[in-house]
Amino acid sequence: MFSDNFRRGESEKSRFSGVKASRLVSSLSDVAWKAFQSVNKRLPEGEAVRPNWAPGPLLKSYERTSPPLGFPRETDSLCPRCVKEVRESVISGATPLEDLMHTHPGEIKAQIFEEDGQVF
């Protein structure tokens, strides 16, 4: 373990007992994890959690997708000047707050690419 490296002035006997205890704890936690997983696989899958703020139930870990990695790729970025303008218009009352839910003001598509070892 990481903390085993910081022990100073201990006899070899006590040092080895700490290593053995660390291995014992690690082995016990591994057995407990495998037992929990085997029970979890046998239980029927429950209904997905649906928070009040979410439009639908949250996805299970195996249902989620990850973004494509590598270069070039596209991402959504925010224009700093546009965000300030939108914020001011919402605060002043010129733009209703609901517009932020249906449109994406200040959002721009950006492309990430690599050139000469630098990412832009």
Image (tube, grey):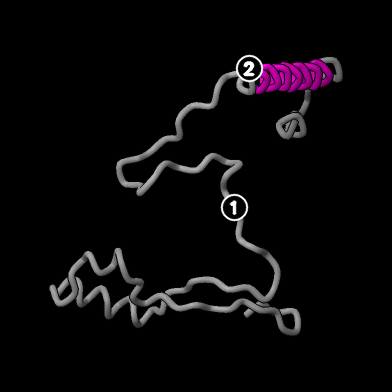
Compare residues 47 and 105 and report the one nearer the observer.
47
Residue 104 sits inside the magenta stretch: no
Q: Name the residue under label 2.
A: 39
Compare residues 120 and 39 and report the one nearer the observer.
39
Query: Could you say which disc has been placed on residue 49 in the image?
Result: none
Whether residue 98 sits left or right of residue 114 in the image: it is left
In percent of width and height, residue 95 lies at 19, 74
**Rendered image quadrant of residue 90:** bottom left
In percent of width and height, residue 82 lies at 34, 81
Residue type, label 1: Thr
Residue at image coords 69%, 73%? 71
User: Magenta: predominant secondary structure element?
Assistant: helix
State which quarter of the image contains the C terminus.
bottom right
Residue at image coords 73%, 34%? 2
CA–CA distance between discs 1 and 2?
A: 26 Å
Query: Could you say which disc has been placed on residue 65 in the image?
Result: 1
Q: Dot 1, how many residues are within 10 Å of its Cα: few (below 14), some (14-19), or many (20+)?
A: few
Q: State whether residue 81 is above or below residue 41.
A: below
| The residue stretch that appears in magenta | 14-38
Q: What element carries label 1?
A: loop
The mark nearer the N terminus, 1 or 2, is: 2
In percent of width and height, residue 32 lies at 67, 17
